[in-house]
Amino acid sequence: MDIAENGSPKFIGADVWRRAHYYLSIRKTVQYLERSFGESIGLTQMAMTAGMEKTAFSRAFKHKTGVTVHEFIQAYRVSEAATRMEISDCSITDVAFSVGFSNLDTFERAFKRIAWDYPRNYRLEVLRTNCLTPVTRKPGK
């Protein structure tokens, strides 16, 4: 995971990250997310980890962090995807599935909303920044 200077994942604000780690019940769920983000994670599993009922957990998470559980999970997954695109040459589809998205369209929409760019453009910018050029293959070669 690419951690920002403030200690938070790339696309999660430092204040949200700090609040998520301050409250014990929410910290437990964030630690669960860090271990299991590539799996299908839902509100039920997160609430069970916190030892709370779904509705109460959802309200508490939003109240304590300022974002919904769903927004937090997606931002965490997009942060992890960005890191993987920066350090590997895996396809964007493989990256999307490895961080827990089950649909490429959903991944692209989430990435665009959170990182303000499409995954392909993000990867190309990373390559340009590192003075690398993407390999293009000619048909039949």
Image (cartoon, rainbow, N blue to C red):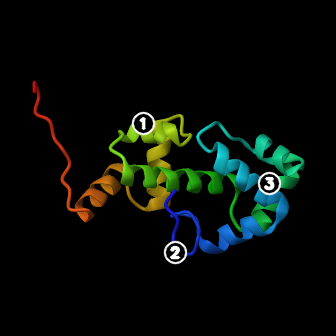
| Above or below for 24 versus 106 | below
- Residue at image coords 26%, 65%: 129
- Residue at image coords 48%, 44%: 107
Q: Which class describes the residues within 10 Å of circle 2: few (<14), some (14-19), or many (20+)?
A: few
Q: On the rendered image, what quadrant is the C terminus found in?
A: top left
- Residue at image coords 62%, 37%: 39
Side (left or right) of 8 relative to 50: left
Side (left or right) of 115 relative to 74: left
Q: Earlier in the sequence, mark 2 or mark 1?
A: 2
The alpha-carbon separation of the residues under discs 2 and 1 comes to 28 Å
The alpha-carbon separation of the residues under discs 2 and 3 comes to 29 Å
- Numbered mark located on residue 83 in the image: none
Q: Nearer the viewer, residue 54 or 4?
A: 4
Q: x and y percent of residue 70 in the render?
A: 66, 51
Marks 3,1: beta carbons within 8 A: no
- Numbered mark located on residue 5 in the image: 2
Q: Earlier in the sequence, mark 2 or mark 3?
A: 2
Q: Which residue type does callout 1 highlight?
A: Asp
- Judging by the rendered image, the residue that carries numbered circle 1 is 94
Q: Which residue type does callout 2 highlight?
A: Glu
Q: Dot 1 lies on which element?
A: helix
Marks 2,3: beta carbons within 8 A: no
| Above or below for 32 versus 141 | below
Q: x and y percent of residue 131 in the render?
A: 20, 62
- Judging by the rendered image, the residue that carries numbered circle 3 is 58
Q: Earlier in the sequence, mark 3 or mark 1?
A: 3
Q: Which residue type does callout 3 highlight?
A: Ser
